[in-house]
Image: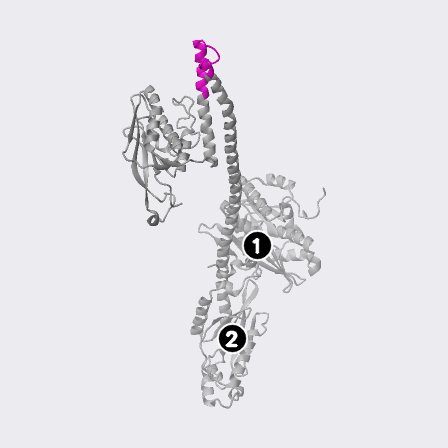
Amino acid sequence: MQLDFVNRELTIKLVYYGPALSGKTTNLQALHKAAAPGASGRLMTLETKDDRTLFFDLLPLTFRSQGSLAVRLKVFTVPGQVIHASTRRLVVQGADGIAFIADSRTNETQHNTESFMDLKENLKQHGLTLRQMPLIIQFNKRDLPDVRSDAEISELASKGREPVYLAVATRGLGVVESMIGLLHLTWSALDAEHDLNKKFGFDPKSFLAQVAQKLGNPKPVPEILQACVGGALDVLRPEAG
Amino acid sequence: MIPPAAAKTFDELTLGHGVSLEDLIDRDALGEMVKSFYDLFGVPLRIFSEEGKLLGDSAEQIPLYVLLNTVKAGRAALSDVAGKVKSIALGEDGMASYPCSTGESYRVAAIQYDGKRIGRMILGPFVKPGENEPPPALLSLDPSLDAAQLLELFRGLPQAEDDSVVNLTRHLGRTLDLILFSGHRALLTSNMHLASVRESFRELEDKNEKLQTAFDRLKELDRLKSNFLATVSHELRTPLTSIIGYSEMLVEGLAGDLSAEQREFVQTIRDKGEQLLTLIKGLLDLSKLESGTMSLRKTQTDIAAVLRDVSQTMTPTARKKEVELVVDVENGLPLMWADSERLRQVFLNLTENAIKFTPPSGRVTLSARMTAVDAARPEDAGGVVIMSARRSAIEFRVSDTGIGIPEEERGRVFDAFYQVDSSSTREAGGTGLGLSIVRRLIDGHDGTVRITDNTPKGTVFVVTIPVKRATIS
């Protein structure tokens, strides 16, 4: 997070993590496509010849709240290929929230696990733990055959803490919901730490509603948040036990 | 060269607070673009960074301004205008217009990137089309200026409608935005490359450090092992000497007569004891050589005598195995600077080995001749011209007609405890210590040892030792 007091501007860094070819860039492309004109900047992609992300993709989104605080979201992806470990570590540094994009296909389960371990390790290198990090998990590619069943994912998700979303990023399904869920968690965490709502007279509910609307989802925020199939959206409150 | 922004962190470059106009564009290329813009549209253009640094200028001298610059009042007016357009407050749309009292106007616009103002562009001066009469302020600026000339130069100013200048400004803004975006992407890519390399380097360094620590630890263990070997073999030797001594006394009948069977048994104890003692001596030598505590007592040595002695010692063994032992020493070999006892050990060992691996009716040859070697050792790469002084040396060859050593094994036979045939059923005995001691002793004499084939079959150990002590260290 970067706070520019002079211009009353807050920059939040969100990172889309996950194994190679799980659809992180596609998520950003879908967000970019959904965003209202003026709300989104150019999507910057640094990719190799074979269309794989070389370093990261960067999508800037800007929203101005009623309290006259401008919030800029910088959404990044990491390169999923195993060899780009050092780049992933660089990009994930300073992230305020992370969306883990998993591939729903049964035979990709192992890759999801490896990438998640990698995320854990990279956070550790920056002195962070998964517990501290606002995190949502998205199971992407729900439209493909041979995917893990909804029931299986729901059952597993209900045991975990992280909100889990189902998505088909190529068609933009579940993309905005994942983003709103992540932003909700991230904002709660930042507010808990920096007392932003009070300092800037910021209303997170209307802010989320504005973001959702500018991303083309006019539903009420609580309804959007309920799109997750498991986990908890208030995981950042102090837990019992 | 590292780009100036290389020191900026990833966050500074991507979260939008550290990027400046200078980071994103090439100044020369921007200058060219500004010039070409002027050539195409006829309106002068200047580009400043947010800090007010001039980054691009169409650089065309405006004749009217050249004239005004010749008088004090003109210079003052021009500098006033320049200051104003650089600092004029811009509206919500990022634009402002500045009309000068001398009749011409400027259009100023912010250069924005990623929602931030990072510089400004200034278009002008220009006048409205058809505006051919200069304002009185210009004509009355300084009485020394020629009114007719002023009028002519004023009419030569670029003419443009304000609306079209606004359009030009917008178009330029969009073009610049694309250039800045590409520049930003290139900057990020190069920075990420650098950062990734640095990160990988750091990882490797970490690993290197761990390996170095492990290596140091191993070296220490190796030293401990050598110490241990030295101590243990010394401690083993002392009681063994007594065992051999007493069995010798028994054999010689000092404790009374022995029956033939008893004598044979005691003789076996003595022989095996001697065998064990040789082995322990070998271990002790090796550990001394490894730890560098063995000192060679070098003197002027008659090497021919040493070889004769070796031959005499080995003749019974060779005869027993029905192997012919031949000594072929060139006449007139000089005295060499060496430890005669250790060299004797070297050639005894090589000859014994050769006999061991040669089948009956084979032949082992021990030869020596003068040769010369390069003073530079093969491992001292370079400087051959300087170092190529030849040193005279003696080349020894111990050849046999035995089973030979496979090419790929030749580098390893000098390792301690290494046996080409390590199966328990191998025909020839031995501990595998001999050759490693041989090599270390030859090293101690600044010499080399290598293995080549003997034709038609068998092995040749070629030992080369310089005659004089090295003068170049």
- Which residue is most to the right? A240
Q: Which residue is mark 2?
A: B163
Q: Nearer the viewer, residue A202 or B328?
A: B328
| Mark 2 or 1, closer to the camera | 1
Q: Which residue is mark 1?
A: A75
**Start-end of magenta stretch:** B249-273
Please name the amino acid that badge 1 sits on: Val
Would residue B65 be seen by someone viewing this image from the given angle?
yes
Vertical relation: B410 (above or below) B149:
above
Circle 2 chain? B
Colour approach in the figure: one colour
- Quarter of the figure that contains the C terminus of chain B: top left
User: Magenta stretch: dominant SS?
Assistant: helix
Vertical relation: B125 (above or below) B306:
below
- Percent position (x, y) of residue B398? 32, 30
Label 1: state its secondary structure.
strand
Circles 2, 1 touching at the beta carbon (< 8 Å): no
